[in-house]
Image: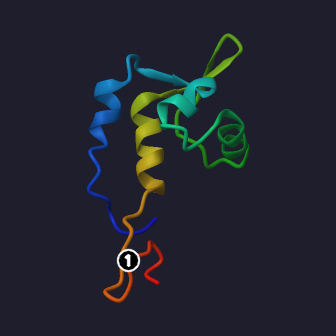
Amino acid sequence: MGTETQFDWESFRRTWPAPIVPRTSFGLFSGGLYEEKYLANQDAAGVGPQGAFRIGRKVVYPTLSAIEWLRQRAASIVRSEKGNGIDGK
């Protein structure tokens, strides 16, 4: 999406206790960035995390796919020299 971030993406894998992420828990997994309804909409549009499947009535994502999906949406914030704000103003 933009400039690669310096974030430790591996920390998601180290701290998440399972090899799958239920859609209903994606808000917890992502630190509140994306909730269940948003993921359902992304899946319906064909742009959600890869490898989604069902276990019973629950939609789940492989943890590594969920991490990659988040990583692809991340971008570093480039600050201008004239301002301190996120948008450089």
Write the residue at 59% across / 42% down: 34
18 sits to left or right of 50 = left
Quarter location, residue 12: top left
What residue is shown at x 46% (from left), y 65% (from top)?
1
Find residue 82 and report its horizontal and vertical position in percent: 35, 89
Q: Position of residue 83 (x, y in %)?
A: 39, 83
The location of residue 63, given as percent across then percent down, is 43, 29
Residue 36: image x %, image y %? 67, 33
Q: Residue at x 31, y 86 (%)?
A: 81
Apparent side of residue 28 relative to residue 57 in the rendered image (left or right): left
- Which residue, given by chain and number where applicable, does mark 1 sit on? 84
Give whichever of 61, 34 is nearer the camera: 34
Total marks in image: 1
Which quadrant would residue 6 be assigned to in this image?
Answer: bottom left
Query: As displayed, is residue 54 above or below residue 86?
Result: above
Identified at 32% across, 59% down, the residue is: 5
Using the image, determine if residue 47 lies above or below residue 23: below
Q: In the displayed image of the protein, which residue is found farthest to the front?
A: 84
Q: Residues within 10 Å of mark 1 (few under 14, many from 20)?
A: few
Residue 55 sits in quarter: top right
**Element type where label 1 sits in the image:** loop
Q: Amino acid at mark 1?
A: Asn
State the residue lying farthest toward the top: 56
